[in-house]
Amino acid sequence: MACKVTVIGAGPGGYTAAIRAAQLGAEVTVIEGDNIGGTCLNWGCIPSKVMKTTAELFDKLRRPQEFGIKLEGSLAPDMGALMARKRDVVDNQVKGLLKLFENHNIQYLRGLGAIQGMKVCAVRLSDGRTMELPWDRLILAPGSSFTEIPSLPFDGAGILSSNDAQCLQEVPKSLLIVGGGVIGCEFAFIFACLGSQVTVVEAMPRVLPLPSVDESCSKVIQREMKKRKIQLHVNHTVDAAEKSEGAYRVTLRPSASLNEPQGPEKKPIVVGAEKILVCIGRKPNVAGTGIETVGVGADDRGWLHADGEMK
């Protein structure tokens, strides 16, 4: 009898593991609450690169003489068409993955999976039905979701998550991005190229404040931001945001990490923005998965404990 392998999560980690397990002869079932492909395909790498491609092309067309091109008439981004193209690219990738699952006889369940104990998983399907699924081996690939700031709750209209930013039908006249990490920096350049007046606020002393990123890389990014007139405020956090007449008045204050702010850093900064995009990192999707029923531990941030073989 074939080994029954259940995979929770159909992102890049989950679907590649599922396909490999099926190739090795396992009877594989994949459970996913969103579309197959996970954040990467539906809300991350793929759609953001579609937007990035358009932004780069638009940026070049705004200075056609540099490339020996003569353009007449006005030039403007069409967000509706861009979003339609993004959906087409994502949909084609989704169809490809579903076809791979079909070719490898992988069962795909659209719903939420929760471990009920050793060898049993409960699935609440998207149509409301529930079912129990036995397993011999379990692969956890639940992925992550965006982190929210309590004082800036997402509403999808004025205060945006990274998901919301990929569904905009118009380019904001002005955009404040909270968080100068990888996601925040990428959106800063995309929307600046499309015509937004972009401001980035980062609590740390530099953008891309990651151990794996050298300070020299941060300096390059900050230099490019300056070239593209992206306003940058490092060592600052959002203290308050007030909405008035369809725009936000945001007060920035020195970060708590600054023991003794010096000079201009002592004073609060007031920034106006039509929309606010919050990109302060991501959190693991472990709530409700039932990992505790099989003795799987997590750290205080929710990341699963695993050994050198990812077990």
Image (spheres, rainbow, N blue to C red):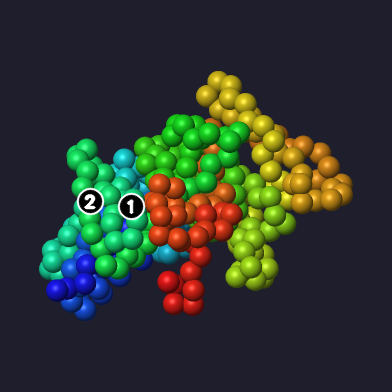
* Numbered label attached to residue 116: 1
Q: Amino acid at mark 1?
A: Gln
Q: Amino acid at mark 2?
A: Glu
Give the SS element for disc 2: strand
Residue, disc 2: 132
Mark 1 and mark 2 residues within 8 Å of each other at the beta carbon: yes
In the figure, is residue 116 to the left or right of 131? Answer: right
Q: Earlier in the sequence, mark 1 or mark 2?
A: 1
Q: Name above or below for residue 290 compared with residue 274.
A: below
Residue 281: % across, % down: 54, 52
Quarter of image, res 30: bottom left
In this view, the residue farthest toward the top is: 245
Residue 117: % across, % down: 34, 56
Residue 140: % across, % down: 37, 62
In the figure, is residue 234 to the left or right of 196? Answer: right
Give the SS element for disc 1: strand
In the image, what residue occupies the spot 21% across and 72% down? 3
Q: CA distance from mark 1 to mark 2?
A: 9 Å
Q: Quadrant of the C terminus?
A: bottom left
Towards the viewer: 59 or 249: 249
Towards the viewer: 288 or 246: 288
In the image, what residue occupies the spot 67% across and 32% down? 240
Q: Quadrant of the N terminus?
A: bottom left
